[in-house]
Image: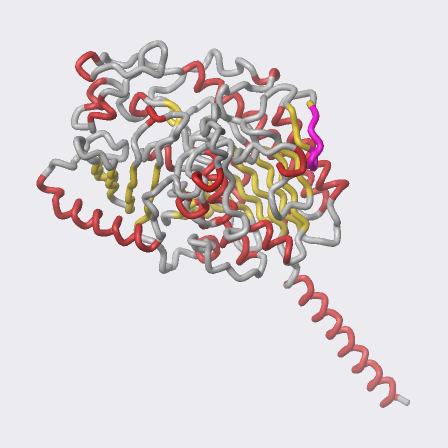
Amino acid sequence: MKIFKMYKAVLLGFVFIGLLSSCKEKEVVKKPNFLFVLIDDQPYDALESSQRYPFLKTPNMQRLQDEGATFQNYFVTQSICSPSRASFLTGVYPHIHGVNQNNRHVDPDWNTYKPYNSHLQQAGYQTAHVGKIHMAHYHGEKHIRPGFDFWYSFIGQGEYFDPMVNDNGKEYQEKGYITDILTEQAVNWLENKRDPNKPFSLNLWHKAVHEDHSPAPRHKGIYKNDSLPVPPYDTHLDNFEGKPEWQRIKAWDSKWKEYVPSDTLEPKPWPIKGYKFKKLLECLNAVDESLGRVLATLEEMGELENTVVIYSSDNGYFMGEHGYWDKRIAYENSMRIPMIIRYPKLIKPETKVDNLALNIDLAPTILELAGIEKPDYMQGKSMVPLLASTNEDHEWRQAFMFEYFVDDAYPYAGPNMLAVRTDKYKLVDDFLADDIDELYDLENDPGEMHNLINDPEYDSIEEELRLKLENLKEQYKYNPDRDWWLRTQIPKKATSNNSDH
């Protein structure tokens, strides 16, 4: 009898261990959720942690940085809304997916270059997009992009107040402030509309902080008594010494769209559009509140620790540097963006990543974390090794290519250009036969003030960078014919201009 009881106890022990092991195995293989919060036009240093703006407080963005990874050198492959958003989704360069400007008629080739959410959906994820898409201006059900189970968006830039929205194909005017409206939709989907038995991927893509930089009424004027710091790099006439002629003549009169000859340039007063910059920073307050509410919702649901939270911007933004505002061209403030990722199962708190990473790297990263093989067409690299790093060396890119194509709606913003950037140098080729290119020593001149293209001491560096650029063009199948996709998509009688920028 005693032997039987002992045998029974041992047997039950094995069963218990087996069940425990099975539970642990199920816990290990549980797929992560994804929350991708994308801002429009947030400068990379418009964060509380940067101290560029001492009065700016972004506690929820700061929480992500404290509990996750902050990328110190994260860039877009083209600094303009539509191309960048398509690159985030597809993992390929704009010259590949076909959206190389903000054109109201053009979408990526979704069939050839499926967005990462389509792959997630096929793997059993429930997917939702809430917010700005800013590609082809489709109405009704056609507005819904591939791979999303839930859709809440709007045409083009949308409006800050009382916007027209597309709710799963149905269009109507919603009352309220756009950041709050999108937040409510995201929280409602998480709490009431998703299948709790499936992993999820939620895009919360804000209109803010795009022009015309309209803050929520509760935040309007909160920085009126604060001084806007002078940009860390000179914004006056000396900045144009040694620059290409196309930049030297790019000083605007009061109508903004007209050129002023370089010999009439006057020092630019600061703040250049400073009132707009303060409004941009005021808009960030509602964004930070939104982030805090969504994080709190995930925490209440018990899903926060199993959710990869991604926070970024679709491009950078000039805040007076070089006398500019907006983005587009190949200076750091335009092409560099904030990127913060929180996922405690993989990432240690306060992780800093110095490697050169790109917006095309996000899609492969999400797929690897979801256990999905990267499709061959994706040109980006998974950042999982960087996120899991404990400062070991990884085989990673040492240089990358940036591209810009003249925007039909804003042809005066700058010429076609390619740039190659390493951790130390940047070369910009503007394709102008009668003008000079640009070369900067980023270690000694982080503000890109001194063009070294005609300095003989840098001839060998220029030669090396041009060779790198040629190799990158070949690697990424660069097609200099920027209209190859547009010609197949735009109706002959349709205008290609898009008033949005």
Question: Quarter of the image containing the N terminus?
Answer: bottom right
Q: Position of residue 273 (x, y in %)?
A: 39, 15
In the image, 386 versus 363, the foreground residue is 363
Part of the protein shown in magenta: 167-172
x, y percent for residue 172: 70, 25
Task: Tell me, yes or no, if residue 289 can be seen here.
Answer: yes
Quadrant in the picture for residue 215: top right
User: Quadrant of residue 138 in the image?
Assistant: top right
The single residue placed furthest to the right in the displayed view is 1
> Which of these two is toward me, 169 or 455?
169
Principal secondary structure, stretch drawn in magenta = strand
Q: Position of residue 317 (x, y in %)?
A: 40, 29
Residue found farthest to the front? 492
Q: Is residue 309 magenta?
A: no
Residue at the image position 41 percent from the left and 33 percent from the top:
316
Residue in the picture at 33% in, 32% down: 329
Most distant residue in the top direction: 254
The vertical placement of 203 against 316, above or below, is below
Quadrant for the C terminus, please.
top left
Viewed as shown, does residue 157 lie left or right of 16?
left
**Extreme left residue here?**
456
Q: Give the number of callouts.
A: 0
Q: Position of residue 22 (x, y in %)?
A: 71, 70
Side of 51 where 36 appears, left or right: right
